[in-house]
Amino acid sequence: NRATKSQQKRARTLNTDSDLDILDEMLLSYDRRALPGSREKNPTVVFCELFIRSFGSINPESMVLISLILQIIYLFALIIIISNKDYEVDLYLRQSWVDKRLQTPNLSRPLDLNDPNLVKKIWKPEVFFVNAKEAEFQFVTVPNVLIRLEPSGNILYMLRLKLRFSCMMDLYRYPMDTQVCAIELASCK
């Protein structure tokens, strides 16, 4: 039984090494500047998901204070005060797409790549948050980023971000108002 476990571990290590060799070989002719579907002149469809880990502090007392001030001052000042309301979000941005150039049936399993040098070598969508005022990538000991490459060419790109967004508040129905603060995601291309 012990020999079997040792052999399985060794086989996994050999597969991992050979999988990384296959990836290294693929990346020699891979151009990360070209869109995945550019040869066929097809658009690259990217699916995006946001997983919100936490919201920064939202202080309801400051909301009430702003509302009271708004009842006293002019409309021009109202716009200035409201436009300064921000909120912070700690989130994971997950993007997935198919890159046929990285399609490799020889891979024994999906590869999880978190080495920043490997991550830089693969095409990634250029997305940004339209209403973000500040953005911070999460680094603890290494960048908090992952690319999962499946043998089929499906790519999952996940990174952790801390963002500060602006939120225009509509206090017209105060104190019965409800605020809706959007997170707007867009593509550069």
Image: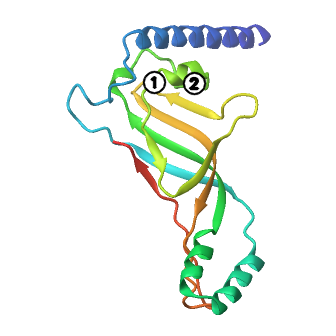
Give the amino acid type for the residue marked by disc 2 in the picture: Leu
The one nearer the camera, 170 or 16, is: 170
Please identify the quadrant where the N terminus is shown.
Answer: top right
Query: Which color mode does the image show?
Result: rainbow
Image x and y of residue 5, in percent: 73, 14
**Apparent side of residue 148 relative to residue 26 in the rendered image (left or right):** right
User: How far apart, in angstroms, are the residues tagged by discs 2 and 1?
Assistant: 10 Å
Image x and y of residue 71, in percent: 64, 92
* Residue 113: image tag: 2
Give the amino acid type for the residue marked by disc 1 in the picture: Ile
Q: Residue at x 72, y 84 (%)?
A: 64
Question: Contact, CB < 8 Å: mark 2 with mark 1?
Answer: yes
The residue beneath circle 1 is 122
Q: Residue at x 36, y 29 (%)?
A: 99
Q: Residue at x 57, y 76 (%)?
A: 169
The one nearer the camera, 48 or 3, is: 48
User: Is 110 rendered above or below residue 5?
Assistant: below
Q: Residue at x 57, y 19 (%)?
A: 117
